[in-house]
Image (cartoon, helix red, strand yellow):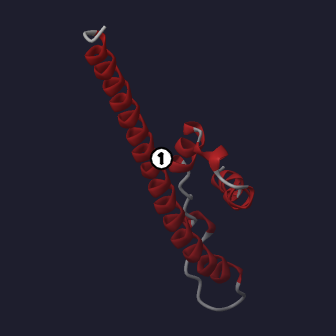
Amino acid sequence: MIEIYPSIVQGLISVSTAFIILKLERWYDKRKHFKALYGEVEVNLNIAENLVSLAESIGSRGGERLGTVFDLQLFHVNCFEEFKSSGYFITLDEKTRKSVEVYELISSHNR
């Protein structure tokens, strides 16, 4: 009977170690996806700021034009698509999910 205890303890240690490693990997993966999405949102905000000035110059009558509609940049959506396919999108609260739905508009802009 005493010979069984070390095997049980060793098995519990192995299972708990594997569980901890899996949790840490999942946490790191989630963090990586959120950071990538945040970076993509920042890049898209910069593009949007440039688009506003370009749209104002194209729409202005008279004044100097800064560009044409062919100068419009596409927004980035790769990180969002990966974020959505990874399943982290459903972990967001309702308010955040609603604000991230702007990516549907981005997809239509890119088309």
- Residue 102 spot, x, y in % from top left: 69, 59
- Residue 33 spot, x, y in % from top left: 47, 49
Q: Nearer the viewer, residue 71 or 62?
A: 71
Q: Nearer the viewer, residue 105 or 4?
A: 4
Query: In the image, what residue occupies the spot 71% across and 52% down?
Result: 104
18 left or right, relative to 94: left
Q: Nearer the viewer, residue 102 or 62?
A: 102
Query: In the image, what residue occupies the spot 32% across and 27% down?
Result: 13
Give the residue type at disc 1.
Lys
8 left or right, relative to 30: left
Which quadrant of the figure contains the N terminus?
A: top left
Q: How many marks?
A: 1
Q: Is residue 91 above or below residue 106?
A: above
- Residue 76 spot, x, y in % from top left: 53, 55
Query: In the image, what residue occupies the spot 49% across and 54% down?
Result: 34
- Residue 10 spot, x, y in % from top left: 28, 21
Query: In the image, what residue occupies the spot 70% across and 62% down?
Result: 99
